Image (spheres, grey):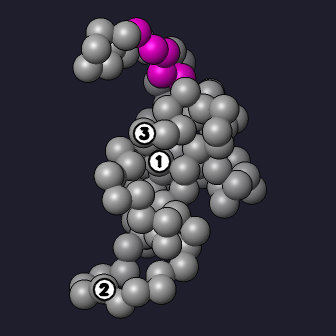
Amino acid sequence: MTLEADDRGKLTTKSQIVDYCQRGEALEQSNIIDYFVNTYEIDIDSKGDAALVSGTQDRKRRGRPCHLRVRYLSGHPKARTKQRIMRNPNHHTLPNFIGS
């Protein structure tokens, strides 16, 4: 668990256990290792691109398709500000286990 301060100096806790327990429905079948290896957290942009969150892309975009964005459940402390991004299936990220 980690303590973080926001722009106004308010302290909040950051916990990977809370992140995993409050993961979005699209990730509910992931085990904890798959969850942290195959996703990463970013800020929700001001546009709140609903098409990308739901996994459907109605409008045409240039370039590569965006990865699926999954928001936390409403009970998560950062449900309004953070979301998870699914990594490409061919990524090479490995878990880093700390301790003995």
| Count of residue discs | 3
Residue 25 vertical position relative to residue 64 in the rendered view, above or below: above
Q: Is residue 15 visible?
A: yes
Residue at the disc numbered 3: 81
**Local SS, label 1:** strand
Q: Nearer the viewer, residue 43 or 98?
A: 43
**Local SS, label 3:** loop
What distance separates the C-alpha of mark 3 from that of mark 1?
7 Å
- Residue depicted at x 26% and y 20%: 7
Q: How far from the left and from the top, in percent, is residue 95?
A: 48, 43
Q: Amino acid at mark 3?
A: Thr
Say few, some or many: other residues with alpha carbon within 10 Å of mark 1 (under 14 / 14 to 19 / 20 or more).
many
Say few, some or many: other residues with alpha carbon within 10 Å of mark 3 (under 14 / 14 to 19 / 20 or more).
some
Q: Is residue 87 visible?
A: no
Q: Which mark is residue 61?
A: 2
Q: Which segment did they paint magenta?
A: 11-15
What distance separates the C-alpha of mark 2 from that of mark 3?
24 Å
Residue 9 vertical position relative to residue 24 in the rendered view, above or below: above
Q: How far from the left and from the top, in percent, is residue 3?
A: 41, 11
Q: Amino acid at mark 1?
A: Gln
First reached walking from the N terminus: tag 2 or tag 3: 2
Q: Amino acid at mark 2?
A: Arg
